[in-house]
Image: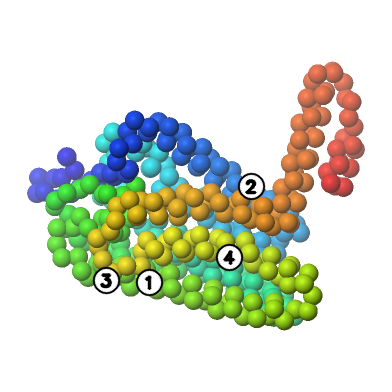
């Protein structure tokens, strides 16, 4: 199965985690709940920023785009992972595998560039506050975002073209939890040194480049913040960067260990664990980090929660008592004064 008459592989089998057949239904429910939390968290952050006028500033614009990106990033891998937990064959077509690799890398690169743009935004806001409004305009932020998406979707094209031309005529079991470059390249029945070197070079550039710019930005930010005379001023400056730094460390830490290596051999459990981190845990934690550590977003979320809770209470009371016990003005005052 998975080969044509001329022994060319037409589909792959995703190995996933071995020895979990007896708990696969439990893992399916756990992963499904996690995916629903990812969708809910990122949708809430995106909508709160879009609906709250006082959050219509470049910093929150980038956060909303990051939440929007995470929705698509997780949609590339998690639905298929859920399907594989219930599907005995766990198969994926050759073209489907290439598409998954392409979108996984293009969206991952877009996120790396977007995190770099967010670091540049913080650098301008803290190091050049007088010029910040004239430099980081909405139009400039939009151009940065569009550039991130364009570069992200164009950058992996050479890798995908090269891997699509490799001959696959032997084993078709991908020892991973989804299709990715290293596991797929390792199945090619030819010399893959060129593909491995290209994969390493492109991965090194797309990871080390943004990381270097982010580190440079924060080195300058720290120098400026340390010169702020008041402790309260330093605390506020650092707090605006803390959430971004946590997300940067989680994302680049996992993908860096995963992709920057000049070899096609790899530790199966090591890679699968890292894949879970950057494909599931990081998108799950991002909205939580931004919600809990960002006062403006947290206040906006509680504001809407209080309003909708009072709104629901109003109709429950009306249905139980058969008449209005609360006037509209009461919950409107609570909403705007909360």
Q: Is residue 83 visible?
A: yes
Q: Is residue 27 above or below residue 203?
A: above
- Using the image, determine if residue 26 lies above or below residue 112: above
Disc 1 target residue: 204
Q: Position of residue 285 (x, y in %)?
A: 56, 51
Where residue 25 appears, x then y in whole percent? 40, 31
Disc 3, SS: helix
Q: Is residue 79 left or right of residue 285?
A: left
Upstream in sequence: badge 4 or badge 1: 1
Label 1 Cα crowd, 10 Å radius (few <14 / some 14-19 / many 20+) = some
Displayed quadrant of residue 194:
bottom left
Residue identifier under label 4:
245
The CA distance from mark 3 to mark 4 is 30 Å
Residue at 26% across / 36% down in the picture?
A: 89
- Element under disc 1: helix
Contact, CB < 8 Å: mark 3 with mark 2? no
In the image, farthest residue toward the left: 6
Q: How far apart are labels 4 and 1 at the CA level?
A: 20 Å
Residue at image location 77% in from the left, 46% down from the top = 303
Label 3 vs label 2, nearer the camera:
3
Which of the labelled discs sits on residue 44, or is there none? 2
The answer to which of marks 2 and 4 sits earlier in the sequence is 2
Comparing labels 3 and 4, the label whose residue is closer to the camera: 4
- The residue wearing badge 3 is 197
Q: Are marks 2 and 4 in contact (CB under 8 Å)?
A: no
Please state which of residues 161 and 262 is positioned toward the viewer in this rendering. 262
Residue 266 pos. (x, y %): 28, 58
Is 185 on the left or on the right of 260, as rendered? Answer: left
Q: Earlier in the sequence, mark 1 or mark 3?
A: 3
> CA gap, disc 1 to disc 3?
10 Å
Vertical order, 313 against 305 (above or below): above
Instruction: For the N terminus, give its image quadrant.
Output: top left
């Amino acid at each position: 199965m998975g080969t044509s008459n001329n022994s060319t592989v037409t589909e792959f089998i995703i190995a996933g985690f071995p020895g979990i057949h007896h708990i696969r239904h439990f893992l399916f429910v756990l992963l499904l709940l996690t995916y629903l939390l990812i969708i809910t968290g990122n949708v809430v952050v995106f909508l709160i920023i879009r609906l709250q006028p006082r959050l219509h500033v470049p910093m929150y614009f980038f956060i909303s785009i990051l939440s929007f990106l995470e929705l698509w990033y997780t949609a590339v891998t998690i639905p298929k992972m859920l399907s594989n937990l219930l599907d005995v064959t766990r198969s994926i077509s050759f073209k489907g595998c290439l598409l998954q690799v392409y979108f996984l890398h293009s969206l991952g690169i877009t996120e790396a560039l977007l995190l770099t743009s967010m670091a540049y935004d913080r650098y301008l806001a803290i190091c050049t506050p007088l010029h910040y409004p004239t430099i980081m305009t909405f139009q400039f932020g939009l151009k940065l975002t569009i550039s991130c998406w364009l570069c992200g979707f164009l950058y992996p094209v050479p890798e995908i073209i090269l891997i699509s031309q490799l001959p696959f005529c032997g084993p078709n079991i991908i020892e991973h939890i989804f299709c990715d470059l290293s596991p797929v390249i390792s199945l090619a029945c030819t010399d893959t040194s060129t593909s491995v070197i290209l994969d390493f070079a492109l991965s090194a550039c797309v990871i080390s480049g943004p990381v270097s710019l982010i580190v440079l930005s924060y080195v300058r930010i720290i120098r400026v913040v340390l010169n702020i005379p008041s402790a309260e001023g330093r605390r506020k400056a650092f707090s605006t960067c803390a959430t971004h730094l946590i997300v940067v460390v989680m994302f680049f830490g996992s993908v860096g260990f995963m992709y920057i290596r000049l070899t096609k051999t790899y530790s199966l459990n090591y890679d699968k664990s890292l894949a879970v981190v950057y494909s599931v845990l990081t998108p799950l934690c991002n909205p939580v980090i931004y919600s809990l550590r960002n006062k403006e977003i947290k206040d906006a979320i509680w504001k809407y929660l209080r309003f909708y809770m009072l709104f629901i209470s109003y109709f429950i009371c009306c249905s139980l008592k058969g008449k209005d016990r609360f006037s509209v003005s009461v919950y409107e005052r609570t909403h705007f004064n909360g």
